[in-house]
């Protein structure tokens, strides 16, 4: 079993709008995968900000290991 690490996943929604969350996963790919374009994503991210959006609104996803 792969060791899990912490990753910061940033969903770039365009016009400088970003939604970020810290997750534990086995790889960067795993941290950013598992959602199709019709999925609704809801989470409380950094600075206790609540986000809700559809994956179809996401322009790019970036993942950084912490």
Image: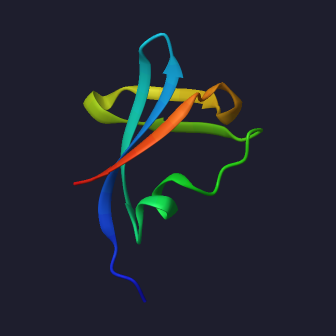
Question: Does 15 sit left or right of 24 as displayed?
Answer: right
| Quadrant placement of the C terminus | bottom left
Q: Residue at x 63, y 57 (%)?
A: 34
Q: Is residue 33 above or below residue 59?
A: below
- Count the marks: 0
Q: Residue at x 41, y 72 (%)?
A: 26
Q: Residue at x 72, y 47 (%)?
A: 36
Residue 41, how many percent across, how many down?
Answer: 60, 38
Q: Residue at x 71, y 41 (%)?
A: 39
Q: Nearer the viewer, residue 24 or 14?
A: 14
Q: Is residue 51 above or below residue 21?
A: above
Picture quadrant where residue 10 is located: top left
Picture quadrant where residue 42 is located: top right
Question: Does 46 sit left or right of 61 as displayed?
Answer: left
Question: Does 45 sit left or right of 56 as displayed?
Answer: left
Residue 30, how many percent across, how many down?
Answer: 50, 63
Picture quadrant where residue 20 is located: top left
């Amino acid at each position: 079993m792969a060791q899990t690490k912490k990753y910061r996943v940033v969903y770039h929604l365009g016009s400088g709008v970003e939604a970020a969350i810290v997750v534990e996963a086995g790889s960067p790919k795993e941290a950013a995968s598992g959602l199709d374009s019709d999925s609704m994503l809801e989470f409380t991210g950094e600075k206790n900000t609540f986000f809700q959006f559809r994956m179809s609104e996401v322009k790019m996803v970036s993942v950084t290991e912490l």
